[in-house]
Image: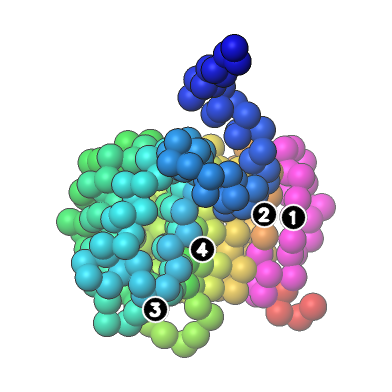
Amino acid sequence: MKQRCKELPEELWGSILNRLADDDDDDYCDLQSPSLVCKQFLSITNRFRQKLAANGNVFYSNRCETLCRALERFGSLKEIELSLIGAESDVNCPLLRIASSGLDLQSLSLYGFPNSPSANTFRILGSNMNNLKVLRCTEFVSLRDPDLVHLADALPWLEELDIRHLITESNHSVTDAGIEAISRKLLGLRKINISGNRGCSDRSLIALSSNCVLLIEIRCSTCNITAAGIDFALRHSPNLISLRARDYQSSFTFEDSKTCARNLRAIDLCSYGN
């Protein structure tokens, strides 16, 4: 008489399927086929996904119902990217959905939003996402100093902040006043990108280097930065590893500052004249 084979425990199937996943593939494409085999495999592979990219208005229509279902399905997400949100869409809705999802996010990227989320949305996000260390608010049509302060008040534990701005003549970008304010609030900041914000000058570099002593990376291309600001950053950022400042004003002689930037491994400088 043939003996019936015992079913493998879910933990063992999980180990097998996890081996199929390519650690460098954020979309876990190698698990798409196994996930179609049965509901058990679908449930297991859902737990392996740690990154979700929500691109297109389909995620934001009907009060973000599609996004909400994705958040419920993938309960182990650590990183979310939101982009291509329509100009008439409510930018607060997707963030409020994420804040109430119960996920333990570590990274949140927002690309090309028409305007900044409200202060209340940032507050709710911060109260529910205590492990959120990386926030990218890049190429917003409008992101101003008060928005930046609301962000810093809600998430004072941020370690990486990216607020790259579209290089336009718009006055809807961040200035030195905003950077100075958050430099006193985000004391654990390790990486920052303020590129494209023409309202940021040497004052921003001075504030960041003076107050955020843990900084290891600064990106400030196409700002109103001069050689003096770069020199100050190198002299007063003992942990700095990487500095990128393209399209800055005047020329810079690295010889004067190199002894102060002992940990520097990468530097990318290109002035207007080069």
Residue 183 appears at what percent x and percent y?
Answer: 41, 49
> As shown in the figure, which amino acid type bears the numbered disc 2?
Leu
Q: Note whether residue 171 is visible.
A: yes
**Mark pair 2, 3: CA separation:** 26 Å
Q: Is residue 255 magenta?
A: yes
From the viewer's side, name the closer residue of 225 and 54.
Answer: 54
Query: On the image, numbered disc 4 is attached to which residue?
Result: 194
Residue at image x 65%, y 72%? 248
> As shown in the figure, which amino acid type bears the numbered disc 1?
Ile
> As shown in the figure, which amino acid type bears the numbered disc 3?
Val
Q: How many labels does the image show?
A: 4
Q: Which mark is residue 141?
A: 3
Q: Which mark is residue 214?
A: none
Return the residue found at the far front: 1
Label 3: state its secondary structure.
loop
Q: Residue 243 carries which label?
A: 2
The answer to whether mark 1 and mark 2 are in CB contact below 8 A is yes
The answer to whether mark 2 and mark 4 are in CB contact below 8 A is no
> As shown in the figure, which amino acid type bears the numbered disc 4?
Ile
The answer to whether mark 3 and mark 1 are in CB contact below 8 A is no
Label 1: state its secondary structure.
strand
**Mark pair 1, 2: CA separation:** 5 Å
**Mark pair 2, 4: CA separation:** 12 Å
First reached walking from the N terminus: tag 4 or tag 1: 4
Label 1 Cα crowd, 10 Å radius (few <14 / some 14-19 / many 20+)? some
Residue at image x 39%, y 78%? 141
First reached walking from the N terminus: tag 2 or tag 4: 4
Is 56 left or right of 192, judged from the image as shown? left
First reached walking from the N terminus: tag 2 or tag 3: 3
Report the span colored magenta: 245-270
Is 64 left or right of 272, judged from the image as shown? left
